[in-house]
Amino acid sequence: MGKETDAELNAFIEKWKETPEKNRETFLHFREYLAGKEGVTLEFISRPGVTYSLRAAHAVQKKKELFVMVDVIEDDPRWLSVCFFGEMIKDPGEKGDFVPKGLLGEDAVCFDIEERNEELIRYIEFRLDEAWRSASEG
């Protein structure tokens, strides 16, 4: 992540007050999880009043510009939507929602997190690993 993007993300996180749903904590968990993956770069896109997006791409990825987008949805309270390109993951537990043209104009599978849920977080981590492997193949 570039210094400017990192600074903007850190400023956003500092201003975000945690709520009983623990979505700030969950967002930070996914940020750290993705940052720990080899070859991953993170980009933060701020659209105040709408969404704040953390986008992850793999260094060798060529077909897509990212492999996952973790959106903070501006609501009261804020909640998360973790979206993957449909062809990059499986959803054996059918915990996600299929969203036609939902990620940069392509079919997506999105997982909404309205409050911290350890089982769902682990499930999404498996999807993150799967998408990361897919992205690492070019």
Image (cartoon, rainbow, N blue to C red):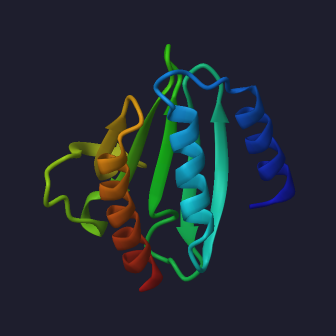
The residue depicted at 40 percent of the width and 30 percent of the height is: 115
Left or right of 8? Residue 68 is left
The residue depicted at 62 percent of the width and 65 percent of the height is: 35
Q: Could you tell me residue 48's position as x and y percent?
A: 65, 24
Q: Could you tell me residue 107's position as x and y percent?
A: 27, 52
The answer to whether one can see residue 138 in this image is: no
The residue furthest bottom is 137
Left or right of 92? Residue 7 is right
So how many labels did they put on this image?
Answer: 0
The residue depicted at 66 percent of the width and 55 percent of the height is: 43
Left or right of 82? Residue 28 is right
Q: Nearer the viewer, residue 114 or 105?
A: 114
Q: Is residue 17 above or below residue 90?
A: above
The answer to whether one can see residue 110 in this image is: yes
Left or right of 101? Residue 27 is right
Which quadrant does the C terminus fall into?
Answer: bottom left
Which quadrant does the N terminus fall into?
Answer: bottom right
Q: Is residue 9 above or below residue 32?
A: above
Q: Is residue 50 above or below residue 46?
A: above
Find residue 59 and report its image quarter. bottom right
The residue depicted at 73 percent of the width and 33 percent of the height is: 12
Q: Could you tell me residue 56's position as x and y percent?
A: 55, 61
Q: Nearer the viewer, residue 76 or 29?
A: 29
Q: Could you tell me residue 117's position as x and y percent?
A: 35, 40
The residue furthest top is 76
Find residue 57 and report its image quarter. bottom right
Q: Nearer the viewer, residue 39 or 16?
A: 16
